[in-house]
Image (cartoon, rainbow, N blue to C red):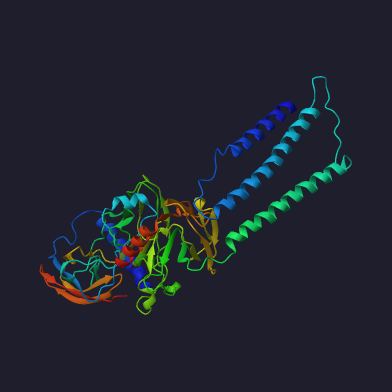
Amino acid sequence: MIARVVAGLVVLAVGGSAAGGGPPHRGLPAGTISGKVTYTGTLPKLRQIDMSKEPNCVTQHPTPVMTQDAVTGPANSVRYVVVYISAGDQGAPAATDTVHYDQKGCLYIPHVAAMQVHQPLAIFNDDPHSHNIHPLARVNAEWNKSQPKGAPPIRTSWDQPEFIPVKCNVHPWMHGYFVVLATPHSAVTDSTGEFSLAGLPPGKYTVTAWHERFGTQSQEVTIGGSESKTANFVLTARPY
Amino acid sequence: MGKLFAVVVTVIALVSAAIFAFHVWWLPPDISTHGVRIDRQMNETMVVAGALFVLGQLALAGFVWRFSAGERGAPRPVKSFPGGPTPLVVLATVLVGIEILVLTFVGSKVWADVYQTPPAPGALQIEVLGEQFAFYFRYAGADGKFGAMHPEMMNDATENFFGLDPANDTTARDDIVVGSLVIPINQPVVLEMHAKDVNHSFYVPELRIQQDFVPGLVIPLHFTATTPGKYELVCTQLCGLGHYNMRAFVEVKTQPDFAQWLKEKAAAL
């Protein structure tokens, strides 16, 4: 708890200075950690999402929509894995760009959004009907808000690091995650399972990969100067 | 003023009675085998209650007209009750009481014949889950057996609405779970109704069926649909903020279409 408060204060202080402008870590050499997340084992069978309750959404998807809790790509790559610096951060400036989270076709886009504590988050409803977004926060304050069609975006942010499942109170199949981190260095793997964490000053880092079903894995990476290092992760998939 | 009130009461009574008498807003056509009895009972209730309503309102308007202040001065004196025509009041009360009791007994019989009789043997069994704010339906699949429900395993994110445990329970693996109630015509269907969280209600006007879900109870409900088509199922118990959006569709298909649909769903598992 104390660590969290301290981390929060550091972020606040850094956030204040970042508001003054300037690129991250000006003048320091910056390295990059990039890599790919793959899986071994047997994947769970994805189920087709039945949206028949909301005919609007059915017509928006000419092909069947599958659940997004285990999305994989070519060569066993895994999508929607959050890769972030879990230790070794050196007080990087806070992320100030707004994270966009869309509700479209009765899906959350992106399925997983990673952000830093206090980073602005804007939630849009692009559907011609209501949604009721409900982040199931336990550490942060939990809330749920109705967003009728055409309503302005909900602008908010989170105070504490937390993996927050998000659901829609009127469309039970809609699920996503807000991954709120202490670090500004995070990435969500793309459809080929790749990620890249740039702007890292020299130092020793713990890089952690988190997936909603396949769990968490960490490894240590040392950056010296402006070098690029590779960190690949192999997660274990289970059929159930 | 009193005479104007009498006229307004008369107009309201006659117009509202006419709306019912001419079926201006009425139930959609019945698509069930039992619905004809519900409709008959509904008609009887409407005729009897409607006749009393119109007579009562016209009498009210008549008395208001007669005893209101006329052009020539003070209103006529009105007797107060008790003290007035006691036998008349008692007679009216008893008559209305008998009418209500008769409607209750006759109506209960029709209701019980629909809701409290066992389903026909060989009825198609479908499980229904009401949750905030959607309905889900489960078919037993090829093995004809439903996998057990484990509330702690319910997970909307993986579409495991019924809390099935396919890792350990082989009967759950072929269960078909969908968001629309798809049924064949002319085959008795029995629904086993489960509530995940709070009270909900299953209301399909065309089926002449309305039944509550109650958490902790498994409520059986059976009926036979007779007309193919797509109908709306709505929740009619205020169940939370999203209640207005808690609905699903009922698709009544011909027997071959239903068999084909079931086959496709099983193949997609």
Quarter holding the N terminus of chain A is bottom left
Q: Which residue is more in the foreground, B196 or A9?
A: B196
In the image, residue B203 sits, relative to residue B193, either above or below, namely above
Whole-percent x, y for residue B67 in the image: 81, 29
Whole-percent x, y for residue A233 in the image: 19, 74
Q: Which residue is more in the foreground, B136 or A168?
A: B136
Whole-percent x, y for residue B120 in the image: 52, 66
Rendered residue at 55%/68% (across/down): B217
Residue reaching furthest to the bottom: B168
Rendered residue at 67%/30% (across/down): B8
Whole-percent x, y for residue B220 in the image: 53, 66
Residue A75 sits in quarter: bottom left
In the image, residue A176 sits, relative to residue A39, either above or below, namely above
Count of numbered tags? 0
Quick check: can you spot residue B263?
A: yes
Quarter holding the C terminus of chain A is bottom left
Q: Which residue is more in the foreground, B29 or A179?
A: B29
Quick check: can you spot residue B237?
A: no
Q: Which residue is more in the foreground, A183 or A11?
A: A183
Left or right: residue B74 compared with residue B142: right
